[in-house]
Image (cartoon, helix red, strand yellow):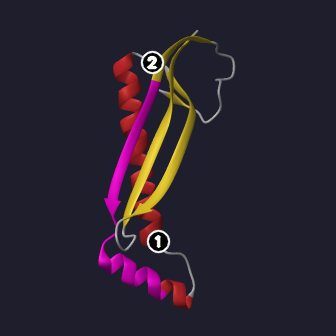
Amino acid sequence: MIVSTTDNVPNKEVSEIMGIVAGEAVLGANIFRDFLASIRDIVGGRAGAYQNVFRDARHHALQDMIEEARTLGADAVIGVDIDYEVIGEKGTILMVSSNGTAVKLR
């Protein structure tokens, strides 16, 4: 499955628009990761635990979107947009959503 943030695929022509597809992932960042990330913020360095949470959430959201496109019989998803939101009372829940247009290519 071709997935692109652009509105076309090089050397291919969109022959049919199948519809808008989306995927979401909602993940909680556990308290130990929060604690370790805050220590890293104080002493410097990258917050690897948070990077992994973001990466996993993005992967799940994209996979859900791709599966929805496959169900429609699409060859590609174009115009993909990925959004990140922190939700919850203390901002400890990460929501990642991806959406795009499922298309058939020629």
**Percent x, y of residue 99:** 48, 36
Count of picture labels: 2
Q: Residue at x 34, y 71 (%)?
A: 89
Alpha carbon of mark 1 to alpha carbon of mark 2: how far? 35 Å
Q: For numbered disc 2, what is the local secondary structure?
A: loop
**Residue sitting farthest toward the right:** 11
Residue type at numbered disc 1: Gly
Give me the disc on residue 82: none
User: Could you tell me residue 97's position as x and y percent?
Assistant: 44, 46
Q: Pointer 2: what residue?
A: 74
Viewed as shown, does residue 10 lie left or right of 14?
A: right
Q: Quadrant of residue 43?
A: bottom right
* Residue depicted at x 45% and y 18%: 74
Residue lying at 38% horizontally and 78% vertically, measured from the top left: 34
The residue at which mark 1 appears reads as 48
> Is 6 within the magenta?
no
- Magenta segment: 20-39
- Membership of 22 in magenta stretch: yes
Residue 67 x %, y %: 36, 30
At 46% from the left and 58% from the top, the residue drawn is 85
